[in-house]
Image (cartoon, rainbow, N blue to C red):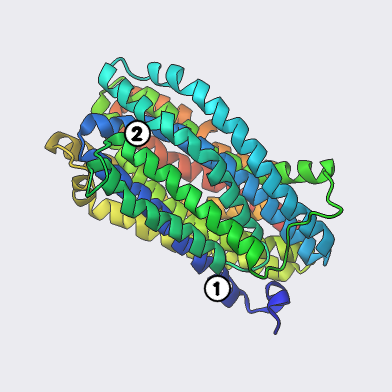
Amino acid sequence: MSAENKMADQPIIKLIVTMSLPPITSMFMQYSYNFVDSAFVAQLGEKALTAVSLSFPITALMCAASIGLGVGVNVLIARYLGRREQDNADTASTLGILLAFVCGLVLNIAAMFVIKPYFKAFTKDSEIYALCLDYMSICVFMQIPNMVHIAIQKIIQATGNMIAPMCFQIAGVIFNLIFDPVLIFGIGIFPKMGIKGAAVSTVLGYTFSMVLAFYVLLCRKQKVKVKIRGFRLQWDMIRSVFTLGLPSFIMNALNSFMVTFANMFLVGYSMMSVAFFGAYYKAQHMIVMTVNGLIQGCLPIMSFNYGARQYDRLNSTYFYGTAIAAVMMTLGGLLLFACPRGILGLFKASEEMIALGTKAMKIMALGYAFNGISTMTATYMQAVGRVRISMTINLMRQLIVLLPMMYILSSFKGLDGIWLAFPVTETITLIFALVMLKKVYKKVE
């Protein structure tokens, strides 16, 4: 069996495992680093943790744009390869890198103008505001290297090579993990930079990943290549990249909007609840994005086989992938349910925060299994071109249903109502996703 056609004829379970393990590993490493990064910052005090928590929606939105563009390129290349259109696949690869540079620059500049009014809207505490600006005025420069290295990661993943992207992403994580405490606390010859050190480490880590990504793409043999001679912009292809990547952008951008709106509810109770939610969300995000690694492995398989009209393999990938996602999310939920005190202790939480957080984490963990099923269903819809359904599922989970539930339930149960809104939303979204699946599945059998 050649590596060229493994997505067409390799046993599905084996294919899911080999395609998913590398991105699962890299996602776990990446977001466990983010978790540890916040734990390091928390050692500077609760206000520093609050500043990073308030900054999260901006960095999450920037990362969402990177992932959305990358996934759009990934799906398009996988389809071209499934149809054996090599020249189009090479053109899409080159286009993806150019778009990453241009969009990264635009978002970098936009973020520089947004941060001051954004933070002023959320805090009147001058110390927290200053810490927010110290952190984000540096972090905005992560966008170009972040966007480019994710674009190259998705380009290579579309060919079935999941190992190389894992390696250069993990290399950046390890770089961050080493320099984070060094620059925050000042170790050896390095000065103590405090919260600025965390931001500098993040930017340098993404830059390191980008350099390695270019090396892997340009200097190692790949099934697609950067096309210089004869390359021209194809507007239909650009439109396809953004259309195909839109559901993934929305799914990840909604994290940013959801945290923003949740913070708007939480500041009415206390800044401590904002700090707690930031710490919790780092733990939750580590679980969800690890499962996103499974989705990264399943999406190109489903896209390839949809393009190749191998619908049995497309549907088998969905069902096996959904089962694995549900198990992974259930285990993550059980971890949060069983160990809230230990997790919050890593953030130097006070007894008051631990008391608040223990109850909140146990409530929010109840909907985790449903999250895995509905998210994989949205990915299936994306692979078969049902973009509107995919976007609707993601919008329901983190905006359309969640925000009204927060408002309604908090009116009756106060702060506990905000936590309860999460599992209630997951239940409603799952029901909708399964109804849509039943309709679409019959058309692609």
Q: Which residue is mark 2?
A: 53
Q: Position of residue 269 (x, y in %)?
A: 27, 22
Sequence-earlier tag: 1 or 2: 1
Furthest-front residue in view?
189
Q: Position of residue 166 (x, y in %)?
A: 51, 63
User: Which residue type does callout 1 highlight?
Assistant: Thr
- Residue name at image x 39 percent, y 21 percent: 119
Furthest-bottom residue in view?
1
Q: Position of residue 380 (x, y in %)?
A: 64, 55
**Quadrant of residue 104 in the image?**
top right
Disc assigned to residue 332: none
**Quadrant of residue 417 in the image?**
top left
Q: Which residue is mark 1?
A: 18
User: Is any part of residue 380 visible from this angle?
Assistant: yes
- The residue lying toward the viewer, choosing from 240 and 95, is 95
Looking at the image, residue 396 lies above or below residue 373: above
Mark 1 Cα shell of 10 Å, populated few (<14), some (14-19), many (≥20): some
- Residue name at image x 47 percent, y 45 percent: 427
User: Which residue type does callout 2 highlight?
Assistant: Ser
Q: Position of residue 154 (x, y in %)?
A: 62, 56
Q: Secondary structure at mark 1?
A: helix
